[in-house]
Amino acid sequence: MIEKKDDRDTCIICDQLKKGGIHLYTSFICSECEKDIVQTDTNDPKYQFYVNQLKMVTKPEIYS
Ligand SMILES: [Zn+2]
């Protein structure tokens, strides 16, 4: 059994090891990015980036 030394995960949005956040399927979004996504206006180009990142999470098997 593999036991992690800490509870940090790599966030799929900012690509940083962060502690605390939400797990979507096998991916992880840190609480800071989660807050960012919620606060970003849908017209903001940044929002499209978030959506694209999240698409990879929700459809990981599409090209396999
Ligand atoms: Zn993040």
Image (tube, rainbow, N blue to C red):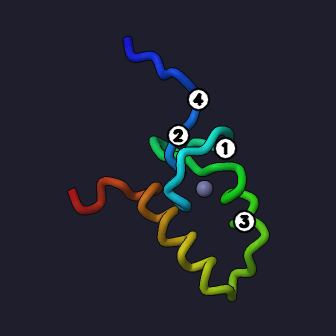
**In which quadrant of the rendered image does the N terminus lie?**
top left
Q: Nearer the viewer, residue 26 or 12?
A: 12
Q: Residue at x 57, y 70 (%)?
A: 50
In the rendered image, the vertical position of residue 7 relative to residue 31, given as above or below? above
Q: Are marks 1 and 2 in contact (CB under 8 Å)?
A: yes
Q: Which residue is mark 4?
A: 7
For label 3, the crowd category at 10 Å Cα-Cα, with few meaning under 14, some 14 to 19 and many 20 or more, is: some
Q: Residues within 10 Å of mark 1 (few under 14, many from 20)?
A: some
Question: Which kind of residue does numbered mark 1 sit on?
Answer: Gly
Quarter of the picture containing the C terminus is bottom left
Element assignment for label 3 = helix
Label 2 Cα neighbours within 10 Å, binned few <14 / some 14-19 / many ≥20: some
Q: Quadrant of residue 60?
A: bottom left
**Amino acid type assigned to the residue bearing label 4 in the image:** Asp
Give the SS element for disc 1.
strand
Q: Are marks 4 and 2 in contact (CB under 8 Å)?
A: yes
Q: Earlier in the sequence, mark 4 or mark 1?
A: 4
Q: How far separated are the C-alphas under marks 3 and 1? A: 12 Å
Residue at which label 3 appears: 36
Q: Foreground mark, 4 or 1? A: 4
* Alpha carbon distance from label 4 to label 2: 7 Å
Q: Residue under label 1, please give it.
A: 21
Residue with the mark numbered 2: 9
Q: Quadrant of ligand 1?
A: bottom right
Q: Residue at x 45, y 41 (%)?
A: 26
Residue drawn at 59 percent across, 51 percent down: 29
Label 3 – label 4 distance at C-alpha? 21 Å
Q: Secondary structure at mark 4?
A: loop
Q: CA distance from mark 1 to mark 2?
A: 9 Å
Q: Nearer the viewer, residue 42 or 29?
A: 29
Q: CA distance from mark 4 to mark 1?
A: 10 Å
Up the image or down, 37 lies above or below 34; here it is below
